[in-house]
Image: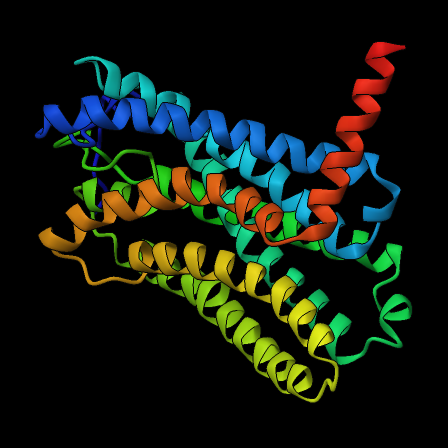
Amino acid sequence: MITVCNNSYGDFILLGFSDKPYLEEVLFWVILIFYCLTIIGNMVIVLVSSKDPKLHIPMYFFLSNLSLLDLCFTSSCVPQMLVNLWGPEKTISYTGCAIQLYVFLWLGATECVLLVVMAVDRYAAVCHPLQYTTIMHPKLCLQLSILAWGTGLVQSLIQSPATLQLPFCSSRRVDDIVCEVPALIQLSSADTTYNEVQMSIASIILLVVPLIIILSSYGAIGKAVLKIKSTAGQKKAFSTCTSHLLVVSLFYGTVTAVYLQPKNRYAKERGKFFTLFYTVVTPTLNPLIYTLRNKEVKGALIRLGRRTWDSHNN
């Protein structure tokens, strides 16, 4: 049965937390602060990784990719989120919603793959240290980076059109803070079985499988680290790996809760906070996790600061 909709391209209303106006006021300032910290923190990581020769190694190449990704990811949804939280106007145009959906899916799927690539890089560094530079040569690093960004783009080009083709006749009130697939599927008045199956398959490919690969990599890393006789060597290996594992836990834990949780009213309400976490909080914490636990990055920041100070004085 084909549903005909005359207002297919009308505006959507992102309800967000409109039933809790007191919470919206608090969230506006919290999100604004986190967004500013995200911009500053990730721009610093990209700048330091590109400027400091000592950081021109695979680990920091992928870290700068992650920081660039987080910059784009938050910027694809947070400005609109702030506009909706600031006042009673919650609308977003159909075109705006479509663009947000395409970019949001692209970058979200890219991060899933990029975190796997970073885990593989850590596996090669810890488990095969003598062959590391041969294995992770610059050409392969570039290819893996392109693979991550390309996979995310393909996922978005497949799932976004299928979601946007759904009829939204009865209501255009999206019970979410962003235009993402689960909320738009629930909004449609048509049979969404195909879309739900598509989303489930994509979730398994981009969430479950990568998580298994990452955990397997860290299982092997854990065994290799325990075989290191030097205590200092063990601490260094654990330090770099636990930072990445913490980032993985924050991202996958919240995204999985949104895309794989059972569909009920309680899960929907809780899902808004999970979405808020992986779109706002996690991109802010990523640079802090890597810089606070990493002496090389802190050293690079100090050297960059000194060079900037010296050039300014001269």
Q: Is residue 237 left or right of residue 249?
A: right
Relative to 193, say whether 5 is above or below.
above
Relative to 141, say whether 204 is above or below.
below
| Of the pair 97 and 219, the residue shown nearer to us | 219
Q: Residue at x 53, y 64 (%)?
A: 245
x%, y% of residue 308? 80, 21
| Of the pair 258 and 243, the residue shown nearer to us | 243
| Of the pair 40 and 2, the residue shown nearer to us | 40
Numbered circles on residues, count: 0
Q: Residue at x 50, y 36 (%)?
A: 73
x%, y% of residue 100? 43, 31
Q: Residue at x 41, y 31 (%)?
A: 34
Q: Is residue 34 left or right of residue 49?
A: left
x%, y% of residue 134? 91, 69
The answer to which image quadrant residue 169 occupies is top left
| Of the pair 196 and 100, the residue shown nearer to us | 100
The answer to which image quadrant residue 306 occupies is top right
